[in-house]
Amino acid sequence: MAKLLDLAFGDLNSAICKKYALDMIDHSDEQFMVQALTEAQKAAQIGEIPVGCVIVKDGEIIGRGHNLRESTNDPTAHAEIVAMREASKKISNWRLEGCEVYITLEPCPMCAAALIMAGVRRIVFGAPNRELGACGTVWDFPNDPGFDNHPLVKSGVLRERCEKILVDFMKSLRQQ
Ligand SMILES: [Zn+2]
C-alpha cells in the first residue's frame, strides 16, 4: 500500500492525499464485491451454496465464478477455482500475478493455496469462514512462511450482504 501511494503521489505525500487514495481503493473494492455477490446469487438460483468470486487485473474483471460443486459433481468446483480457470484461460497464463481476487466468503485451504500458488497479489473477502477459513480465521496461508507468495488480505468488505445471502440460503433449505 505504501508503495502504491508513493507511486501515485510522489512528493505530494500529504495526509489528505493518502486519505483520498484509500477512499478510492475502498470504493472499487466494494464495486468488485458487488460483482462477486452477483455470482453468489447465480449459485443460489441453481441450489448451490451461494459463494461468488471475481478476479481483477488492471481494474478489469478477467474471471468470474460461483460454486458449482453439486451441478458438476466436482469437489474442486468452488467459486475461486472456477474463476481462476476462466481468468487463466483469458490471459493464456496460469500465473495470475498482479491479480486481485474478490470472494464473498473467506477461501478454504484448497482455494487459498491455489490462489497463492497462482501468484495473486491481493485477496479480498466479505464474510469470514469460521469453519474452514484459510486467510486468517482458522489458518493463515497468506502469511505462512512455507509459501513464497504472500498476498495482501482484506476482510469484511460488504460483510453483511455476503453473510446474509448465505444465511438466507440455509433458511430456505430448512423450509423445504
Ligand atoms: Zn474453496
Image (cartoon, rainbow, N blue to C red):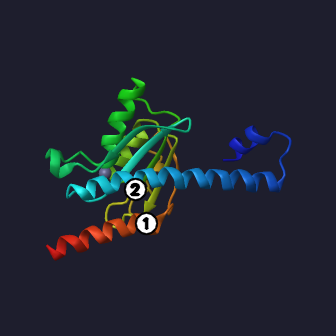
Mark 1 neighbour class, 10 Å CA radius: few under 14, some 14 to 19, many 20 or more: some
Residue at 74 percent across and 40 percent down: it is 8
Residue extending furthest top? 92
State whether residue 70 appears in this view: yes
Residue at 45 percent across and 69 percent down: it is 160
- Callout 1, which amino acid? Arg
Q: Which residue is mark 2?
A: 37
Task: Pick whichever, 108 or 67, lies toward us.
Answer: 67
Classify 42 as above or below 72: below
Q: Estimate the x, y position of residue 89 in percent, counting from the top left.
A: 35, 28
Residue at 23 percent across and 48 percent down: it is 68
Label 2 close to label 1 by CB (< 8 Å): yes
User: In terms of sequence position, does the residue under pointer 2 or pointer 1 come before the other?
Assistant: 2
- Callout 2, which amino acid? Leu
Check the picture and name the quadrant holding the C terminus. Answer: bottom left
Q: Which residue is mark 1?
A: 161
Total number of numbered discs in the rendering: 2
Mark 2 neighbour class, 10 Å CA radius: few under 14, some 14 to 19, many 20 or more: many
Kindly report the distance in space between the C-alpha atoms of the residues bearing marks 2 and 1: 8 Å
The reply, left or right, for residue 160 in relation to residue 52 is right
Q: Estimate the x, y position of residue 2 in percent, counting from the top left.
A: 71, 47
